Amino acid sequence: MAGAHRNAYLSYKKLRLERVGAMIPGFQVIIVGAGILGLASAYHILQREPALELLVVDKKSGPGEGDTARSAAAFRDMFSSPVNRALSQGSIAFYDRIEGERGGIGLKKIGYLWLATARQAEERRAVLTSMARAGVRFKALEIRELSARLPDLRTVDLHQGILGLNCGILEPLKLIKFYEQEILRMGAQVRYRVEVSGFTLNSQALVSGIRTREAEISARTVIVAAGAWTGRLLAGVGIEVPITPRKRQLFSIPAREGPLHGLLTTSGFNEHSLLPFTILPGAAYLRPAPASFILGFANPDQPPGLEEPATGDRGFYDMSIRPQVERYFPVFQGQVPTQAWAGHYDDHLRDSTPFVEYLGGALVVAGSSGSGVMKADSLGRIAAGRLLGQESVPLGHGGWFKVADLGLQQRAVPPEEFVI
């Protein structure tokens, strides 16, 4: 650690105890948010510029304890938008590499299985044709094959299944621990239980630092990657962020034995002998987990807003999720969730695709629209590129991405048509 950086850090620790309201210099970059987007951004910034004095702050007590920990933690590359495909494919390739070289992030390519009615199959035909031409790997499964593989499935109004192959699940806290360990190794400072109450502005009214209860800390650049809370944070200094926060709920059903365990450990879809991440026609989904299923539904009628602490509502499960699941998988009848939790999406309604843009002097990484984990590594690379003035950056799969395409001014992103 550089001497000046270390002195600034030690002064910061002392000021937290003794001098409320002081101004602390010394950091070139401050990142607000130690979730997956904030730490992936820190990692790729330091990969390119290891001498940068970088501080990450978060109000939680550890990395990823906000919405990252509360996500379904699944990934797919089945998107209609080539931009979203590039973001997810780049991230998946990097996560693959971590799992292969180091292990420990729980990455399993179990696939995504969309169950579709005849109408949905027809509506998706053109999008799927476009994906196939772009090299996205998937299989169309007819009803007879679905019934053979899934004897517990009631086909009712189903017409086909679409099995995405470069798709699966991982353990988000293990992934985020990788990023945290790496940035600490490269000399970053990470401070938890530090709540940002506001931002300092320079003479041009641009963000120049952060305010906490203990002190003001200056930086050449402040990066805000606080997920659904980004808009509320920056609104305090008059900066409007084009995201809409929405609560999303998840429920856990035990599957240690009996018919549910049999469904969970379905063979024939992947090498892990697990049911794929399964999306029903009404958009509720089943996510395999250790000895259990995680059930969720991104309710399009959910009113926007933030809730802290966000909690799962059993009534929502009974009204919105259970009827969908029991219609196609009767083995869930009579089963009761043993756990419920909730987090937030930060929806970018313009095109359901994240953005990386300077707003009021702060570099904002936001709008992940429910796909933060699966695109985080690519977004971290693009944030690093934007900070360091690079026109294009290499993503994890080797493809290059034009940084301005994910901005808000010169944006080149078609609307996403394949949204869960």
Image: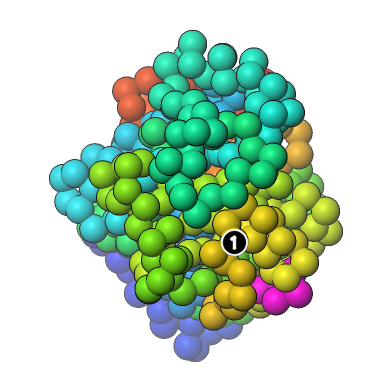
Q: Is residue 389 magenta?
A: no
Q: Residue furthest bottom?
A: 18
Q: Is residue 146 above or below residue 12?
A: above
Q: What x and y, as percent, mark residue 250?
A: 60, 65
- Determine if the magenta segment contains residue 314: yes
Give percent across and percent down for residue 186.
Answer: 25, 53
Circle 1: element type: helix
Q: Nearer the viewer, residue 162 or 418?
A: 162
Amino acid type at circle 1 is Pro
Which one is in front, 141 or 314? Answer: 141
Residue 46 in sight? no
From the viewer's perspective, is residue 365 above or below residue 89?
A: below
Residue tagged 1: 330
Which residue is at 44% across, 27% downward? Answer: 138
Quarter of the rendering containing residue 345: bottom right
Quadrant assignment for the C terminus = top right
Q: Main secondary structure of the magenta part?
A: helix
Q: Position of residue 132 (x, y in %)?
A: 48, 16
**Is residue 86 shown left or right of residue 1?**
right
Q: Quadrant of the N terminus?
A: bottom left
Q: Nearer the viewer, residue 377 or 49?
A: 377
* Residue depicted at 52% across the width and 19% down the height: 131
**Residue 79 x, y percent position in the rendering:** 56, 29
Q: How many marks?
A: 1
For image coordinates 32% across by 34% down, the residue present is: 93
Q: Name the side, left or right, on which 356 lies relative to 299.
A: left
Residue density around tag 1, few if under 14, some if 14–19, many if 20 or more, within 10 Å: some
Return the residue found at the far left: 101
Boundaries of the magenta span:
312-316
Question: Does residue 152 show up?
Answer: yes
